Amino acid sequence: MISSGPTEDRLAIRELVESYNDAVMRHDGEAWAANWRDDATWTTPGRDLTGKENFFPAWKEAMSGFSFVGFFASAGPIVVDGDTAHGTWYQQEFLQQKDGNKMNITGQYEDDYVKVDGRWYFQRRVYTILNAE
């Protein structure tokens, strides 16, 4: 499948993902949370949380264990249909825990987005680990 929909919307969705990744790398919880709708769903291995008030504390807890996070995305298709869209992203993570252990993870996000008042937000992110070392 190839990307489709207005170029300006696809670019704005790419910028949304870049904003998310930047916030992760800077451990900036407020910037991270600003990318989500309040009623969004975040699914990671072993967790399926709906509502920003439920998954934001889980994100902060997870991030508290890392002294460094390198978080880089490569886009798959982004399909825009009016004020909703779906995208696939391949994520490379370079993680250093505070105890010195290092991990390299390759993952995949399947995202649903919604456009509200001209801005794109995550409505649902489903993360799957493809490889971990």
Image (cartoon, rainbow, N blue to C red):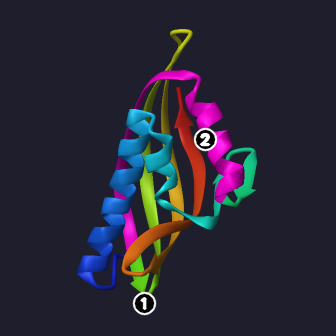
Foreground of the two, 62 or 85 = 62
Element class at badge 2:
helix
Which residue is more in the foreground, 10 or 39?
Answer: 39
Estimate the x, y position of residue 109 in percent, counting from the top left. 52, 56
Image height of 11 relative to 96, above or below: below
Query: In the rendered structure, which segment of residues is drawn in magenta?
Result: 52-78
Residue at the image position 39 percent from the left and 57 percent from the top: 17
Is 62 colored magenta in this rendering? yes
Q: Is residue 1 visible?
A: no
Residue farthest toward the top in the current orientation of the protein: 99
Separation of residues labelled 1 and 2 (CA atoms) = 30 Å
Mark 2 residue crowding within 10 angstroms, few (<14) / some (14–19) / many (20+): some
Q: Residue furthest bottom?
A: 82
Query: At x 36% / y 52%, what residue is drawn?
Result: 19
- The question of residue 125 being in magenta is answered with no
Discs 1/2, front: 2
| Residue 130 appears anywhere in the view | yes
Q: Residue at x 46, y 59 (%)?
A: 35
Res 40 label: none
Q: Position of residue 5 (x, y in %)?
A: 33, 85
* Residue tagged 2: 59
Circle 1 sits on which residue? 82
Residue under the image location 25 percent in, 78 percent down: 8
